[in-house]
Structure formats: C-alpha cells, structure tokens
Amino acid sequence: MRRTFLKKVTVLGLGLALSASALSANQKDWPKELNFGVIPVAGAQKLKDTFGKVADYLSKELGVKVNLITPTDYAGVIIGMAHNHIDIAYYGPKSYCEAAKRANAEAVAVEIDAEAGIPGYYGYIITKRGSGLKTLKDIKGKIWAFTDPNSTSGTLVPTVMFAKKGIDPQKYFSRVIYSGSHEASILSVKNGKVDAASTNNLDFNRGLGRAWEKDNFNIIWKSSLIPGSPMAVRGGLPESLKMAIKGAFISYNDKENLSKMKILGYAPAHDHMFDGVRDLIKFKESLKNKKQ
C-alpha cells in the first residue's frame, strides 16, 4: 500500500512539475524575491542546514530568490505571513490552522513521514531512561515541558489528552515550562532539566545518532495519527506562483537532505486535511471557557 501511495504521489508530482514549468510564462506577475519562514522545531543552524537547501532548491526551480527566515517562535511565522513579510511557510498542523485563519495561509504540500510512509506523524511523551518514570502516573508532581503554545504535538495534542483524563497540567506537575522547540524539549529531558516532555516521532528521529540516542529515553505515551506538517503559501500570491511552488515541493527529491529531515518527500495538501486539528483547537478553547 505504501508503494502504491508513493507511486501516485510521484506521478502527481511529475504532473505538477510540468504545470509549474508551463506557469513560468506568468513570472512577470511574480515578486522578485520570496521569504520562506520555518517554525523553530530545532535550533537556527540546524534549520539552515536542512531547510536552507530547500530554499536554494526553490530559488532554482522558481527562478526567484528565496530567503530563509527562522523566527524564534511559531507566532513569528504566523505574524510574518499576516503582514506579508513571509510568503512561504513550514508550519505544524495547529500553527497552520492559526495561519489559515489569521494570515490567509493556504496549504500546498505536506510531509511524508519516513517512518510511517504516510503524510502524518505521532505525538510522544518522553522521560529519561533510568529515571523510573514509565507511566503518566509516574510523572505526577514532576517538571513538565510543552514546546510552543502553537505546537500541535508539543502542546495541543497532549493538552487535549490530559483534559480527557481529568489532568490539569498546572496542578498535576510541580512546574510547567515551554521549551521553545522540540529539540530543546528532548535535550532538556536527556540532560535532566525536565522530567517529561511532549514531542513527536518525526522530530525525535531527526536527532537520533546526532544529538541523542533512542536508548536515552522512555516513550511513555504515543498519540493517534496527526496530519503531516504542511508547506503553505500566502493567499495573496499570484495563482500561477502558488501552483509553481506546489509543484516544486512535490517534485523535491534531494535524498540526502530528505534523509536528514526524516521524510520521504512531499505530497499534495488541501485545507480540509486539518479539520480534525481544528476540532482539537475548539475542544481546548471550550476547556478555557469552562474555567472562566
């Protein structure tokens, strides 16, 4: 089934690449430069090492200079697009939903997770191996780390899970922090700065063999499948450029860089893929209303 799916994606990618080439005739309406914003799932240098290559590829494919932008938080990417300072963005599912609402973002492509082979990933809760913390009950009264308020697997998904179990993180844990990125959360657990943290299999796998080893951790909880993280464009861009960007992502085939990013490539995306995430956002907001 995985091969059939990837074959379909490849065929569609070729079609879109041809479409992108045909659309290049409309380049006179395109901006001279484009800014590509990336949410801080890791440190700025690591983002430049991987997404910088994607930006260079886009520049060559589109014939337009593409600048990589790495804000310090998820909100920076959303606000940047809302003010027309960011034209293309790598979002998580939740931050994309916020950007679609606040910044007229439009999803064009979605990551295909190398582990699952599908456009989706899984949330994790991790603890340090040898800590004796192996269940959700074990981490009661400990130090907990979310990532960013706009993170899907780092905040939204575990928050909803906790709520359904009757857990209020502010009361359940001795301290709750926001680390700022998945990499920071994972390293904080590894180094003993926090006892448990929420992350996901994709960002966890990206650091294996480089920043940490699987044996450094216990994975004490795994979520249901979450829609893959999308590449999105600013709604105000010319339609021909949007199609060209979509075709470029789906045709991206730098195997070495894709391997570093722990993805197989990109599949076509559409806004409705993220309706389930919107339901989680509404559920979380309803919890706030109950407390008020």
Image: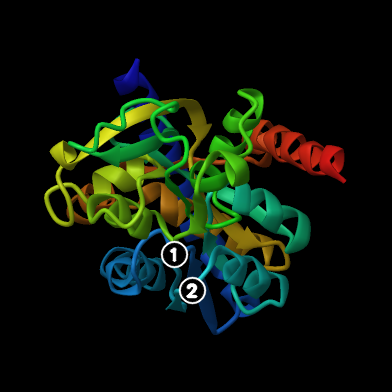
Residue 261 relative to residue 172: left or right: left
Q: Amino acid at mark 1?
A: Pro
Residue located at (34% from left, 38% from top): 126
Residue located at (29% from left, 67% from top): 53
Identify the disc placed on residue 40.
1
Residue 85 relative to residue 57: left or right: right
For the residue pair 20 and 256, the one nearer the viewer reads as 256
Q: Amino acid at mark 2?
A: Thr
The residue labelled by disc 2 is 72
For the residue pair 194 and 186, the one nearer the viewer reads as 194
Residue 49 relative to residue 139: left or right: left
Q: Position of residue 184 (x, y in %)?
A: 35, 60
Q: Residues within 10 Å of mark 2 (few under 14, many from 20)?
A: some
- Residue 243 falls in image quadrant: bottom right
Residue 101 vertical position relative to residue 62 in the rendered view, above or below? above
Q: Earlier in the sequence, mark 2 or mark 1?
A: 1
